Amino acid sequence: MEMFKGYNPGKFYDEMFADDGAVRSHCAPLLQKFGKIDERDFLARKANSELYFLRQGITFNVYHDDRGTERIFPFDPIPRVMPASEWEHLEAGLTQRIVALNLFLHDIYHDQQILKDEVIPRFYIEQAKHYRPEFRGVDVAADTYIHICGSDLIRGADGVYYVLEDNGRCPSGASYLLENRNALKRAFPGIFETLGVRPVDSYPRDLLNMLHHISPRRDGDPVCVLLTPGCHNSAYFEHCYLAREMGIDIVEGKDLVVVDKFVYMRTTRGLLRVDVIYRRIDDDFIDPVVFRKDSVLGVPGLMNAYRAGNVSLANAVGTGVADDKVIYYFVPKMIEYYLGQEPILPNVPTYLASEEADMKYILAHLPELVVKAANESGGYGMLMGPTATKDEIADFRDRIIADPRNYIAQPVISLSTSPTWCDGAMEGRHIDLRPYIIYGKDVKIVPGGLTRVALTKDSLIVNSSQGGGSKDTWVLRH
Amino acid sequence: MLSRVANTLYWMVRYVERADNLARLIDVNQQLLLDFERLDSERLRGFWQPIILSTGDEEAFSKLYDETGSDEVIRFLTDDPRNHNSITSCIALARENARTVRDQLSDELWEELNALYLFTRSDEAHRLIDSDPPKYYEAVRRSVMTFLGIAASTISRNEAWEFMDLGRHLERADKTTRFLDVSSYLPPGADGLEAISPGVLHWTAILRSCGAMGAFRAAQHEISARGIADFLIFSKDFPRSVRYCIEKVDAGLHLISGTPRGSFSNEAEREAGRVLGDLNFGSTEDVFATGLHDYLDALQGRFNRIGAEIFETYVLMPERIQSSPGPRSSSLSDVAAWQMEQQQQQQ
């Protein structure tokens, strides 16, 4: 307990300590275990886990550094712990959400009933940056569009989990979830046995089963590959990691060739037909014949093979329309429309700049709001009202007025905090949660997800590109 | 397997092997230098010049350095990033190759290579190069041996292994010919090699550069130009002799294609078979009749041709369409297993 002495949970919802400073009951066993470790020992183990990441090459390059210095993503050894009941609630909510999102994608790429019934104004879809009208009427394998979804969850001061956004294109980070667990097991062996932490290692198997499920080939084992932009991509480590865990080939665009609407990879024994591509390249780059002509990463002709149903892609083409932040606003309505259910997980209250009343409200309350561009991610294209300068606010005001379709605003949600080791003391830092939802034959969610932590004091931005780190996430059996 | 992956694995191991050989070459010669009393700069040049020439990078060297002294040569071959064949460059290239095929490698194998890479860029490594070079070279060689040991005990004997093995043995064969060729550049003297040193120091150094001292002694050869050339080129058993390495290359190529040995299905196999024939049936008489340097030079040219043909066959050309996933490897046991299945069905 020594290290947690003097820990001040502050005015936010703390994941480990209640407002009165008492340990939340599901965290008590963990705290007891950590209490037996003194600070020196703790630091040695922390250093050890960092060395593990460095040796594994789980690093990113520091740009503009010609010595090729590599850094690890910061990893905080204090896990985030979640009781079983809480996870069951999230699991149900996330399952409901991915099912509704897929029904929505099927609908807008076919009959567009939801637009005809005016649940969502047509204009929002047609102006969505990632809507692909050229794929209307194309049937996809298993009628699934988003096979892997990374929906970001946050917890407010009220202790309620909200969905902040859905990442339905190429959500990244699952390898960190798996490696964080490995690192923590190495650093604190023995701590897992008695605490009843649910394992996370089924993820690669679930992923592979899903890829097999969507294969167009009915005879024999399907050939699945992971398509990477290449080794200079920041998520390259993850691509290799997942491919290896699944036992499939990792390919670059130049390794694939399309002949008569079938996709093949170039092997030492000639061309081998490929059935399923787990692609980690955006739509824009995937086929220079159809999308960006200047893409050197893609596979010319791939879209022809895809339309002909000779190859399946995970995720499907055109899913980006569902993670447009304006469309996000309508997800609870989709759940009601397609499933006739109440949404289990609420959205964060959202104002659409295109709606007249909302626009008025946004412009009048900019210093209190978070403003987001509809199609940016990674913590970019954002205005944090309360900490922004007058110039920044003025700049965003102009941008919103010029292009209302592309902006939304939300109240600032004070993310929950978790005790985090910060230069010699345990302090509260804001966290979020990214679970990885796999939609194959059925929906599989690996218990927990990636807990991202904003290491800068008071910061609410958890993205690794902006000073974020991560933690292991423990879902308890009971 | 993917053509790109095969090519990358092949080069990854070539670079690792190259770094190892360089580490031995420099270490041995640096130590040899201690046996000489002070050499003036002219003689020092006479000492190092053959070594630079043997690496084939003399042009790059003379562009970068005015002097040919110990410091310059050692820096050039060890950790000069401007020399693409320096030890640190080779390790960085090996590691970059490994990174792009990370999924093919065991964790331990990657970790070893990554650790070696991190070591060569560490302050500790730079300190050792200045203060205790033998320790530096030993660290590199030990790590490479660990790397090869991990590879041998964690990689399945499939195509990935065969391409790595091809890279290792082609690089070894090449380096053995180059280190032996150091003798060709020595100023003439008794037995063609005694100008600087009395006795057999230089030849001993060549043997040690090839890691062959112990094996050579055990074979009880006397230390002479002929005996050493015979051992390093024609030994049937020594794992760094040219013949041994080319035997492995030839065997590996046939394992990959499934073609019986003694015949060929591509130009790489054809050339490897020819070279192997010459080595199996050749002798030092041929070598010295041709002249050692010319003989070795010709061999290097043929190794390059084998390498180029491997690239042509397996990386550039794969345009044939397979109807279904083929067997993962074409080792004899696979063929045997398939035949057994067929037999059972006929019963």
Image: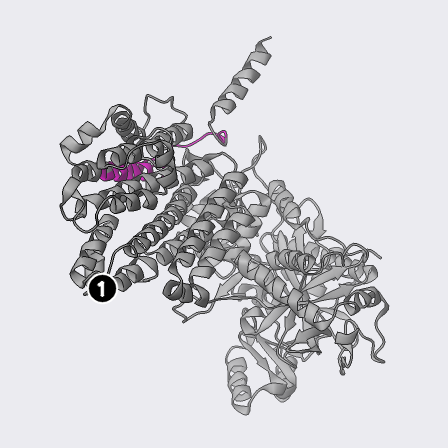
Task: State the predominant SS element of the stretch in magenta.
Answer: helix
Q: Specify the quadrant of the image occupied by residue A194.
A: bottom right
Q: Specify the quadrant of the image occupied by residue A95.
A: bottom right
Please state which of residues A452 and B260 is positioned toward the viewer in this rendering.
B260
The chosen color scheme is one colour
The residue positioned 76% from the left and 64% from the top of the image is A81
Residue A139: % across, % down? 57, 46
Q: Is residue A297 visible?
A: no
Residue A216 is covered by the magenta coloring? no
Check the picture and name the quadrant holding the N terminus of chain B.
top left
Residue B106: % across, % down? 54, 46
The residue positioned 62% from the left and 62% from the top of the image is A49
SS class of the residue under badge 1? helix
Q: Specify the quadrant of the image occupied by residue B47.
A: bottom left
Chain letter, disc 1 residue: B
The residue positioned 65% from the left and 86% from the top of the image is A368
Range of residues picked out in magenta: B300-327
Residue B310 is covered by the magenta coloring? yes
Q: Is residue B180 above or below residue A317?
A: above
Report the residue marked by disc 1: B64
Asked if residue B184 lies left or right of residue A134, the reply is left
